[in-house]
Image (tube, helix red, strand yellow):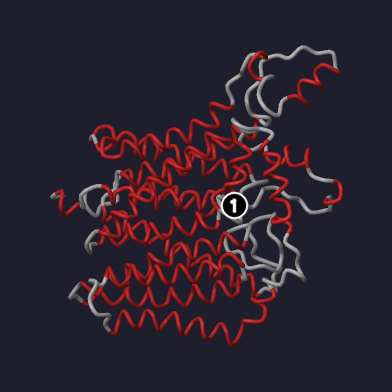
Amino acid sequence: MKGQWDGVAIAALVLLAFSFVFGGASREHALRLAMVELAALPLLVIGLSRLLTTGQWRNHRFALGLTALIAAVPLVQLIPLPPAIWTGLAGRSEMVLALELAGLQPGLAPVTLSPDLTWQAFLALLPPIAAFVGMLSLNQATATRIIAVYLIAAVLSVLLGAAQLASGGQQLYVWATTAAGSVNGLFANRNHLATLLVVMLPFAVAMGAASLRRRHDDRRLPLWFGAVFIGIVVIGLAAIRSRAGVILLGPSIVLSLLAGWIAAGRGRPGPALIGLAAAFVVAIGAVSIVALPPILERFDSQSAPEGRFENWPIVAGASDAYLPLGSGIGSFDAVFRSVEPLETLDPTFFNHAHNDYLELWLEAGWPAAALLIAFLIWYGRRTWAAWRAGTSRERDLQRAASVGILMMLAHSAVDYPLRTATLAVLFAVCAALLEKAGQPSERQAGR
């Protein structure tokens, strides 16, 4: 099976392609997103079948159990409850009052205030769950190829963004909800393209540095690609002008170089590794000379007031009214409209809290907080294991995956990157790679 594109690998590649082509937006594109969800079903079935038949699932009980619990949250919120139960839940008094004024008796109702959107949220979980399950059953050689495909897709997305910029910001946008004039690539939101770049950066550096351990001529291609990818990321972020992307670039660079140093053997940095670091310096220096003023303008709060920060206290206050179970996954818009102060009303549409932790607190309350804590415990343990391990291609990918997850978690504090299928699938791929840090490497297992 090693190095071959078997059924699971082909299904994973299909889902990857669909997620990139049709999964770059999170709303108003139901047909495209449904195609990504349908593409996830074969991988989910084949991946689960392999985990069960080979017994590999036993090595990943906690991670698979946590995944199942995450998927169960929206389903549990959809269960019809008798009036004696749901009318006593926090935040439902207005619904009860409306029924009384209409002369109607309360009937069965679920926890969620927006059942249709909660169901859509569950369906949106299928692609990342399928990616996670499928990647767990793939060997290291195939996983490396999957990451290579991601790197190529990231480059293509940046090239499309460059073409959008060259068109004067008027053409080549693939999503109707895209703001004209911005560099978005295959996404509807430029911030999500920036997230893709900072997440893939550690993979490019680690894979390029790992090639230094080989004594063959084929080591040059990953190294050169890593150097070129560094330039693409820095220049791309300058063109995208995503504030989150610019802020996350610094930590991503530091952690990527550290992962690259470990991948190269933890020895004294050689010319090639120094060259990768120099690529960062040259690219950042060139961008600072040419494009620094437009980037700084994006951080000018006086010229562009930041509404999300002003709305966070409103969301937090609304969250308290629906504890402990929350208002239901997907109900943010309805809840926020009901509590938004009149003095803040304007033509803009605050479709999300731009802080996924706060939004989950509103929509799922204590269960979401418990699952998040469990995930962070898992993440901390697997990251510790990955960074303590020795050098191997498998461990190199695991360290890069830990950095990628950290970048997406950080960006989720000020945006909603994981609500796009593209990044949700990528997050799941990184999680599957990192999950294997708790297991013996393939070489140690004798595979």
**Which residue carries the number 1 mark?**
416
Say above or below: 401 vs 282: above
Residue drawn at the location 44% of the way across and 75% of the way down: 230
Query: Could you classify mark 1 by the number of other residues whose Cα lies within 10 Å: few (under 14), some (14-19), or many (20 or more)?
Result: many
Name the amino acid type tagged 1: Tyr
Say above or below: 212 vs 278: above
Residue 197: image x %, image y %? 49, 65
| 255 with respect to 137 (left or right) | right
Say above or below: 201 vs 401: below
Residue 376: image x %, image y %? 43, 47
Residue 401: image x %, image y %? 38, 57
| 276 with respect to 422 (left or right) | left
Q: Nearer the viewer, residue 53 or 106?
A: 106
Residue 365's image quarter? top right
Disc 1 is placed on an element classified as: loop
| 167 with respect to 63 (left or right) | right
- Name the outermost residue toward the bottom: 289
Q: Number of callouts in the render?
A: 1
Q: Nearer the viewer, residue 446 or 29?
A: 446
Residue drawn at the location 55% of the way across and 32% of the way down: 74
Residue 396: image x %, image y %? 29, 62
- Name the outermost residue toward the left: 446
